[in-house]
Amino acid sequence: MTAPALTTRGLTIGYRRRRKGDLVLARSLCLELARGRLIGLLGPNGVGKSTLLRTLGGLHPALAGRVRLAGHDLARLSPRALARQLSLVLTFAPQPALMTGYGLVALGRQPQSDWLGRLGDVDHAAIAWAISAVGADELAASPLAALSDGQRQKLMIARALAQEAPVMLLDEPTAYLDLPRRVETMQLLKRLAHSAGRAILVSTHDLDLALRSCDQLWLMSATGVVTGAPEDLVLAGALGETFDAAGFRFDQDSGAFIQASSPGRLVCVRGGGAQAIWMRRALERSGYALSDEPGAINVARRNDGETGWKLTIAGRASAHSTIQSVLAALEDGGA
Amino acid sequence: MAGADRARQAISPSSREFAGARLYVLPALLILLGALLLLSLALGSAAIPLDQILRALLGGEADSPAWTNIVLKFRLPKSLTAMLAGAALGAGGLLMQTYFRNPLAEPFVLGLSSGASLGVALIVLTSGGVGGALLAGLGLAGDLLLTAAAGAGAALAMGIVLLVALRVRSGVTLLILGLMFGYLVSAMVSLLLYFALPERIQAYINWTFGSFGGVTVEQLPILASVTLGGLLLSAALIKPLNALLLGDEYARSLGVDLPRTRCGIVLAVALLVSAVTAYCGPIAFIGIAVPHLCRGLLASADHRLLLPGTCLTGACVAICASLIAELPGNNLVLPLNVVTAILGAPVVMVVVLRRARGIA
């Protein structure tokens, strides 16, 4: 195992405030960003994910402790040396007027180019590769003003790729992207980490995607950062602890957050298949508790040959053709 | 895969470096500038034929010695001054618009010209009381003093604007603060005017009208060296300026040394504005209109094209303004600021309206 690309020792992050005392978001962090790994940074809003990324990226001073990047103290690296080691993608994608997609990605070669920013064949090859890698070939010639937020963000990722730095930090790069693009982007980052040996840290709110694609997770909460393989963290209940908020709980079986059912009325749904699964979801969503044993309220598929549902409340049965109708009847009759 | 092939064709080696830019605009501007220069040498209270001008310029004697004199001693310094001033103000405006990421940023709007004016006012208005002989007696030293005062005023104003910009992210706030700074300086100048001698006041008022004609052959080297110094420094800032198009944080992540770049921009803008303002007066609208005009012509955001482009466009616009101010065939000369306002204000209005509609 090679040395990690980036390590922190006793890193305390937050903001210096003159009057009220420093605002500390996380204390004494000892983290390691291994080469060849895609690492997901997860945590509730406002916990300091962006501040951690910006501190690791040298945009924000640490309150205490140090970050070591490729054997150097981050604070002592010159901006240019830092840019050769580490590239960044932030949440927002700027929109400079009169710039093309190619021109934007080409800015990623600044750490390598001469004082005027002239590009050689090596640079053009790196730019073309980066554009193809994110699947933005058809955007290269377009002016940025004509592109959507998601398309611009894709080009910003390509720009970071063109920088060819061994460490990449991305702050919610998929926030503006549609679902297929999000999956694609995470797959791309994973591929880059594995095949190009880069250390990639990506913050995201997309829990499901992070669980499926990241090699390792950093779970950030008010108490600190917990690291590990996604599956270990799920089984140890760390995800639940990090995110648990009133009304939600992390379901280890499905790997997703579900609305915590308040002690609502018990409903028994009989039968299986997609119909029954979605009926159960609808009931959960509407605040009913599900029971396996038949009770006061029972729902079943109609057995008289018609399609639809049979609802029995305290022995009185009614027929319904849609789930919505069942819910409405429960609301009226069951009250 | 067809899409990828098409994209690869679109990024052919010749065009990919400056994709989408109209490169031919630069040589076209150069030719236009040459033509305007000859025109500005030919036109005036006495029209001089082109062949005579060329002969005078190339070191020969024109048919009439008066013509040689007019061309070399009066019209050439004036045209060169106009070119230098236009290039300096255009480049200064470009630097500020890029750094502040604000299309309305420029030396005049953000109070730099006001700062320089204060420096000039202090020298011109108080020298009567402090040591009236100073400026008249020590020609070169007086000129240098005036330039230094204007430079210090401009640098001070730029420094204040920059400090504010580091804390305030809103472009509108910055513009309003610049405007208020301008008012404050005007108040101080008014105070100086109130206590100054009448002939000093007249000299100061004439200066504020703006003119390219007041620079003598002896003063020209000072103006030229300070301005060219500012332009050279700007050229050294081309790469960080391109990165700054993405904002401070992305620029930093691309390896830009932000504190050094900021200092460089302050120094460059102060150099570009100070000498021009000291000798030609606080000239409005060139700094704001020229970068927009140039971006429109070149269709590029790359400062490798925009910096020479704004210099050429600025020089052309300044010579045009100077030609219009002279009203050829007439002895009357309009204040330069009247002409730059008439030429520049519509450009600014278009920019503001386009921005309001979300185009620019």
Image (tube, coloured by chain):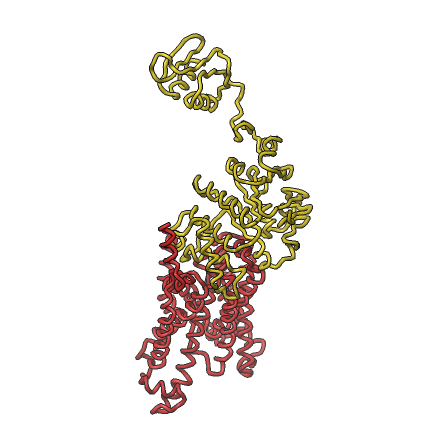
Q: How many marks?
A: 0
Residue closest to the eye, A224 or A60: A224
Which image quadrant for residue B351? bottom left
Which image quadrant for residue B25? bottom left
Which image quadrant for residue A102? bottom left
Residue B250: percent from left, percent from top: 52, 54
Residue B195: percent from left, percent from top: 53, 70
Please give the name of the residue rendered at 35% of the width and 58% of the height, measured from the top-left corner: B350
Residue closest to the eye, B330 or B161: B161
Q: Residue furthest top?
A: A315
Residue B78: percent from left, percent from top: 41, 79
Q: Is residue B118 visible?
A: yes
Q: Is residue A271 above or below residue B96?
A: above
Q: Is residue A6 above or below residue B128?
A: above
Q: Which chain is yellow?
A: A
Horizontal relation, residue A7 to residue B240: left or right: right
Horizontal relation, residue B52 to residue B132: left or right: left
Residue closest to the eye, A211 or B152: A211
Visual hue assigned to chain B: red
Residue B197: percent from left, percent from top: 51, 74
Q: Quadrant of the C terminus of chain A?
A: top left
Q: Is residue B38 above or below residue A220?
A: below
Q: Is residue A18 visible?
A: no
Residue closest to the eye, B144 or B252: B252
